[in-house]
Image: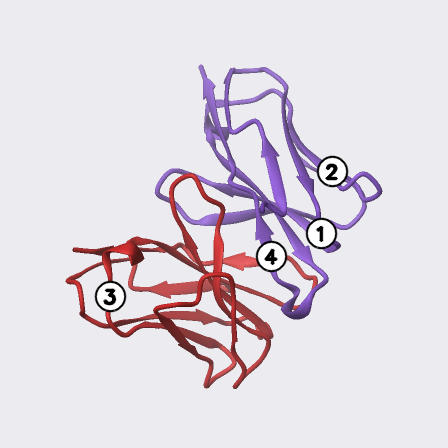
Amino acid sequence: NAGVTQTPKFRVLKTGQSMTLLCAQDMNHEYMYWYRQDPGMGLRLIHYSVGEGTTAKGEVPDGYNVSRLKKQNFLLGLESAAPSQTSVYFCASSYWTVEAFFGQGTRLTVV
Amino acid sequence: KNEVEQSPQNLTAQEGEFITINCSYSVGISALHWLQQHPGGGIVSLFMLSSGKKKHGRLIATINIQEKHSSLHITASHPRDSAVYICAVRSTNTGNQFYFGTGTSLTVIP
């Protein structure tokens, strides 16, 4: 089925550990985004990519890195996790003004 | 600053009621999206609008570009409509970023 797939769906990390979240889309979309969703706040953009090999910072990029080596994949890395990074992470993809598609979310807890 | 404002934040309705959720935005946009998120679930796009009005079943979305305002209406609401509804605008700045409202939590009581 066409769509956006995020892995993993749940993860618990200890402070200081690292991890990578994977976002994969099979719709040949140019644009991909990583957001975090926190209670009482709208989704906030962490990083985004407008095409293979390109990335750019969003609203809240500190503590995260990303890579888009292949058009279909957008990776979000946490090098040294902190409790403030406890959140639900969503990946999205779109092609220009075409409707955006969202992944199912990754619930991350940093203890 | 909030580029997208939604109202109300919370809404409780009786089954069968007509529901309206409002969204105002302050940036130039190429499109506006209405999204639905069920508790603990993913986000699903309901509508993408750049002008006028769209209808899917019991859901109707309208947008007024001049007034920078959009509304989502649900006719004959049902408990399965209970979810968070999020307004998102696609800005015309670099990267065509989305800005999101904080969502409207809707509960429909049988």
Res. B69 mark = 2
The verdict on a common chain for dots 1 and 2 is: yes
Q: Residue drawn 41% across and 64% down?
A: A5
Q: Chain B colour? A: purple
Q: Residue drawn 43% across and 67% down?
A: A61
Give the mark nearest the N terminus, 4 or 1.
1
Q: Dot 3: few (<14), some (14–19), or many (≥20) neighbours within 10 Å?
A: many
Give the amino acid type for the residue marked by disc 4 in the picture.
Answer: Phe
Give the spatial CA distance, label 4 vs label 2.
Answer: 16 Å
Give the amino acid type for the residue marked by disc 3 in the picture.
Answer: Ala
What element does badge 3 sit on? Answer: loop
Could you say which chain is coloured red in the image?
Answer: A
Asked where in the image residue A65 lies, by quadrant, the reply is bottom left
What element does badge 2 sit on? Answer: strand
Residue annotated with mark 1:
B27
Q: Position of residue B96 (x, y in %)?
A: 66, 65
Of residue A80 and residue A20, the one placed in the foreground of this image is: A80
